[in-house]
Amino acid sequence: MTLTLYELGGLNDRRYSLFSWRTRMALADRGYAVEYKPVRVSDKAAIAFSKQDKVPILVDGDRVVHDSWRIAQYLEARDGTDSLFGGETAQALTRFVNSWVDRTIVPRLVPLLMIDVLGIVDEEDGRHLRKGIEKAFGKTLEELSANREKDVAALRRLFDPVRASLRSQPFICGSQPAYADYIVFSPLQWARIVAPVDILEPGDALAAWRERMLDLYAGLGRTAPARA
Ligand SMILES: N[C@@H](CCC(=O)N[C@@H](CS)C(=O)NCC(=O)O)C(=O)O
């Protein structure tokens, strides 16, 4: 059965939803046929059926699942194979990776680059996103991105533990990628899609890993063109 994934769509069909990239990679990993439904971020009527206001949303027959972590767990249970995470212990550890990225990386990256997103969405979506971030951080998008060079350099350093583990293995999960790789990939893929300048430097081991991630599943990640 084809599954349906609701995610954000911007101008020129840019699929820029950070959290949806986790689900996209997970669905490809499990080999599902997927119908993607882009929605505008300000169009809450389009996703009202899910009884909440965020994407990704997965529809599987009469099941509606929202939140990327819950979707990953749902897929793992649906398959019954222990493969998306790599087993029960790995799933518990991956929960830590999810929290680390959501609490350490995303809150630093998203306000910094949100001003760039205004260039890839229509005016109404731009107003919606600006309002949400400015309210959450108590600063204008211009203020939040004022020290971009310094802040991007500091952000790059936050990924040092990932670089250290990539010295011993090609993927965060070992010889093959799994859901923890998709989680860490998602903010970098978001930045790649929205930012006019690559936030990673050439020669960075993280950039080499990102290339490997972009190659997976017939180049799924590359179907979203880099803005830089
Ligand atoms: N914890 C949720 C976060 C989902 C989320 O924040 N999604 C963003 C797009 S990437 C969204 O739908 N935002 C709606 C809005 O800003 O109104 C998950 O992991 O799926």
Image (spheres, grey):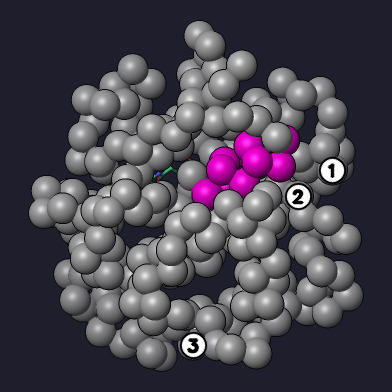
Which numbered disc, 1 or 2, marks the residue that appears first in the sequence? 1
At horizontal 40% and vertical 39% (from top left) the residue drawn is 7
Give the image quarter of residue 45.
top left
Of residues 23 and 151, the one nearer the viewer is 23
Kindly tell me whether residue 157 is visible in this rendering: yes
Residue 219 locus on image (x, y percent): 61, 56
Of residues 169 and 32, the one nearer the viewer is 32
At horizontal 25% and vertical 84% (from top left) the residue drawn is 146
Q: Nearer the viewer, mark 3 or mark 2?
A: 2
Q: Is residue 109 left or right of residue 32?
A: left
Instruction: Give the magenta-colored segment's residue range.
Output: 21-30
User: Residue 28 lies in magenta, yes or no?
Assistant: yes
Residue at mark 1 to residue at mark 3: CA–CA distance: 32 Å
Q: Which residue has dot 3 on it?
A: 153
Residue 92 locus on image (x, y percent): 77, 43
Kindly tell me whether residue 73 is visible in this rendering: no
Q: Amino acid at mark 2?
A: Ala
